[in-house]
Amino acid sequence: MRKNHFIVAAVVVASLLAARASSAAEDGYLWEVTSQMDMPDMPEGRQMPAGMMGAMGGRTTQVCRGEDESENVSKDKEMKDCAISDLKQTPTSVSMTVKCKEDRSGKMEFTYNKARTEYKGTMRMKDRKHGEMTMKLTGKRLGPCDAKKARAEQAAKVEKYKAQADDAQAQYQEMSRKSERDQLKNCAKAADTMNPDGLGLWGGCYKKKDASCKSMMETYAKQQPKVAEECSAKAEELCKRYQTEEGYLKAGRSHGEAAARMCGVSPDDLRKKLCKGASKNESYEFVGAHCPAEAKPLAKKHCAGRSYTVKEGDPRRVEKKWFKFCKAVAGASLEGDESSESSERPAPTPKDVKDQAKSQAKDEAKKAAKGAAVDALKGLFGR
C-alpha cells in the first residue's frame, strides 16, 4: 500500500513546485494540475480495476498553495518520510531528487513559461518492490486563493484519495492472485491432458526466440515469477511426455498436432520411431491406434471373426490380452487413421450386438404388423 502513498507524495511535490510561481502579495494561488501515470512493467493484456485507473492516472485536480515553502513542506503529512536533494532552479525550470523510506525515490523535472503561469513536468519514480513508473504533469495557474482553507480541504481530499487508492490496490492484488491461481491450474491441467492450448503464453512461446516472446516472458518472470517458473516446467514436461508412447497416445489426434508444433517435432517421424519400440515392448494398444503396418497381421490373427460376447474358453472370443489392441484398431479405422489399411476389423462390442438385435426385432415386428393389416383388408373386401 505504501506505493500509493508515494504517488500522493509525488503529486504534493508537484503542487509545491507550482506554488513557487507565486510572487504577489496574495495568500496563495490556485493551480489546476493534470497527471497521467504510466507503468511500463504492467504485463500485456492485464487491466487495472476502474478505481485504480481513476486514482493513478488521467486526473485533473485543483491545488491551492501558499508562498511560504517551508510551511508547505512542514505541514504536508505525505512529505514527512521524504527528503528533497539536488534542487536546481532557473527562471523557467526546476529539477530535484526525492528520496523516501523503504527504498523509494524519484527524479523530477519541470519547465515553466516565462510568466511562470504554466508548466509541464515529468516525474520518474522507482520502488524496489514494485518497479518503475512515470508520471507526466501539466499545471496552469488559475488565480488567488485562501491557502489556509485550501490546505485543510486538501488534507481531507488526500485522505480520501489514499483510501480509494488502497482499495483499488487491494482489488488489483486480488485480481493478480486469482490470475496466478487460474494460470497455474491451467498449466497443470494442460500437462496432464496433453493439451498445449492450456499453457497459454508458455505454450505459444516454447523454444521461440523472437523479440515479442522474449519480452513477454521476461515481463511475466518479473511480475509473476511462480507462474513463469511452474508453467515453463509444465511446457517442458508436456514435450518430453509427448515423445513417449503413453504421451503420444494420450494426446491423440485432437491435441497431437498442436503438441508437435509446440515441441518442434515431426509427428510422422515420431510415430514411426515409437511404433518400432511399441512392437518390441508389446505395447499393443499403441500399435493398434497408430501403427497400421504392424497392426494389420495382428488384427487378422487376434481380432477378425472374434467376439466379446461368447463365453470364456470359446475359441471365437477375443483374448483378454488383445482386447485394448482390437478396440484401438477399430477406433483408428473409424477415425480414418492410417491403420484403416487393415481390412480386418475386430468383432462388435456387447453393446453393438445388443443394439443390432433390438433394431432387427423392431424391423421384424413392423413387417409382421404390415402383413396382418394387408390380410385383414383382403378379408374385408372378399379377396
Image (cartoon, grey):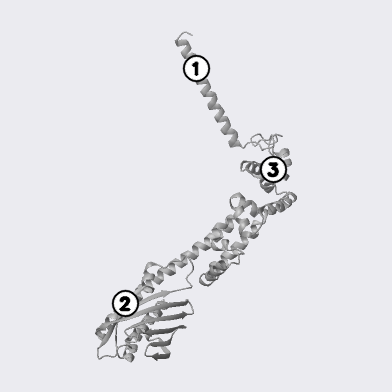
The percent position of residue 291, horizontal first and vertical second, equals 70, 47
Query: In the picture, residue 96 is in which quadrant?
Result: bottom left
The amino acid sitting under disc 2 is Thr
When the figure is inspected, residue 27 is found, relative to residue 282, above or below; the finding is below
Q: CA distance from mark 2 to mark 3?
A: 79 Å
The residue beneath circle 3 is 322
Instruction: From the viewer's side, name the closer residue of 157 and 30.
Output: 30
Residue at far right of view: 280
When the figure is inspected, residue 240 is found, relative to residue 254, above or below; the finding is below
Q: CA distance from mark 3 to mark 1?
A: 48 Å
Q: Is residue 168 visible?
A: yes
Instruction: From the viewer's side, name the closer residue of 302 and 232.
Output: 232
Please tell me whether mark 3 or mark 1 is closer to you in this view. 1
Residue displayed at 60% across by 63% down: 206
When the figure is inspected, residue 91 is found, relative to residue 175, above or below; the finding is below
The amino acid sitting under disc 1 is Ala
* Residue 14 relative to residue 296: left or right: left
The residue beneath circle 1 is 372
